[in-house]
Amino acid sequence: MHPRIEDYALIGDEQTAALIGRDGSVDWLCLPRFDSAACFAKLLGDSDNGHWRIAPKDVTGPCTRRAYRPQTLVLDTEWETDEGAIRVTDLMPQRDRAPDLVRIVEGLSGRVTVRSTLRIRFDYGSIVPWVRRSGGHRVAVAGPDSVWLRSEPEVPTWGKNFGTHSEFTVEKGEKVAFVLTWHPSHEPRPPLVDAHKALHGSVRDWRHWVRRCSYDGPYRDAVIRSLITLKALTYRPTGGIVAAPTTSLPEEVGGVRNWDYRYCWLRDSTLTLNVGLSAGYREEAEAWRDWLLRAVAGDPADLQIMYGLAGERRLPEFEVPWLSGFAGSKPVRIGNLAVDQLQLDVYGEVMDSLALARDAGLPTKPHIWAIQAALIDWLREAWRQPDEGLWEVRGGRRHFVHSKVMVWVAADRAVRTLEKNPKLQGDLDGWRAMRDEVHREVCEKGFDAERNTFTQSYGSRELDAALLLIPRVGFLPPDDPRVIGTIDAIRTELSHNGFLRRYSTDGTTVDGLPGDEGTFLACSFWLAEALHMTGRTQEARELFDRLVGLTNDVGLLSEEYDPVADRQLGNFPQAFSHIGLVNTALALFGGDGAG
């Protein structure tokens, strides 16, 4: 039986991440970065595409229990067998030069025989490396990649079926530590990591980081787990945050809606900044703001919706035919063609983010306002174009209402910044006129008076859950009848077993794709916040409670949820979902004890 998406847990070192199943198998790991080719790709194929399982010898199924050590990204997985019990502790310590995957086996009771099966397959499971012994290590090399495996104390290993195997026994209190280290094959082996010191240091560092969290309201454990997950999805060298550490986990099992999310989206920027600033993580917020500034620098007409970890612009999309896909969901895609789309809403999100950062007192820089002024001046003419919208539809451009609302946000934040900072230069009257024109057009062309709701695009009868953000961004006040009507219409038409779809995929061509998808978790969090803003706080809190209940056993959320099959869908774990959890908790309970 194929595992479910929620069967996985995450470990990482803020430059890449691994997914580990309930059976003790590392089924996904890209080295050395989030967006590098995977050396373990069983997640999207089978065991021959690379994995590393450590478990009791005769156990083929899931563990007895697992959990993160409190307030850390260190994972403990335990098995109880007839012979005794063991614990496997998994972590990726903060790297010095090279990434390390540390796996420590500890005997808890009895005497248990443990088996380790390691199959390294570079380039997304397609390349079998040459493996040799070297001074107590196993060394796997293919082209530019080299991986070293060692154990402490050393246990015998042997090669079979293009894998590296070992068996050993542990009694209560005995420990065997494995360290897997990657480095470029043309360079000498990096310094060895002490597995036990790495464990101690990781636990200490994560708990020290968590102490900075200013939120102390209800659901604090869920909020902290989400913040740790967002920290783990941050590419430490640049401050960029990947949408997810995975590619091609399906939005519909067996379907074609499988995308690569190992990049940084501008549309996440305002919500991410808000999380950092509101939860006590100004340093991370500033790093994200600075990544944003570097990424968007240049011609405003060339602004992209997403970038690579360091701001790279070219993210070509191709398919990997040798991988069968998660639960047979093909194709497996690398890269993302949506990078070339026009999505006007990102201009609003960038302007909103930079205004939020300025208002919060983040250290400003002389060129920030010049970038903002250039963006808004370009948008003054460009906003009249149709675009692909924030959902990156592949069914043709339209005049998406959410995009136009975010154009209004861009103009509004430019106007407000000038009003608060009269020393800055800009066309205040012109930007005010633009803001008023956009607002007037959206209310005329994007509103269905008969149904008392804003629509997905001009002249459409379809709805879009992104319209729930209208009161959040200040386009209309929460008590405006059009806002309340839109919230009610979306709840009625896009609800699926109590959670929200992004938009309808039934009989429409808006996204240009066959098949269906699950309910979109970020949208359901937006609904909870919108209900709260319109005075329905009890309903909002009930919905939030249900949403938190969808996290898996270690507190993680994917992009979507199938309420019929009761399973998570889409790339995992998903930053947008965890951002939604934290922001909604802050909105609903911030007055209950948040700092």
Image: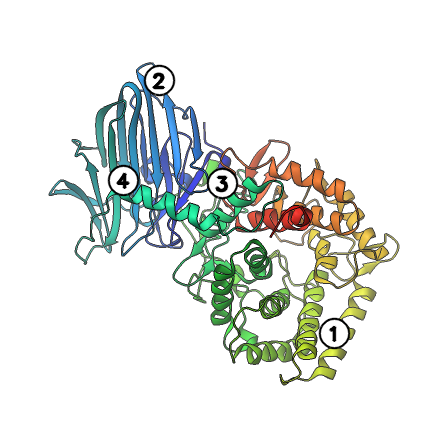
Label located before the other in sequence (1 or 2): 2
Find residue 113 and report its horizontal and vertical position in percent: 25, 22
Q: Residue at x 70, y 46 (%)?
A: 528
- Disc 1 + disc 3, Cβ < 8 Å: no
The earlier-in-sequence mark between 2 and 4 is 2
Q: Quadrant of residue 276?
A: bottom right
Q: Residue at x 59, y 68 (%)?
A: 350
Q: Quadrant of the N terminus?
A: top left
Q: Find disc 4 in the rendering and name its residue.
A: 196
Crowding near the residue tagged with mark 4, few <14, some 14–19, many ≥20 C-alpha atoms within 10 Å? some
CA distance separating discs 1 and 3? 44 Å
| Secondary structure of the residue carrying numbered label 2 | loop
Residue furthest top as drawn = 82
x and y percent of residue 149 in the render?
22, 42
Q: Disc 3 designates what residue?
A: 329
- Determine the CA span between mark 2 and mark 4: 25 Å
Q: Nearer the viewer, mark 1 or mark 2?
A: 2
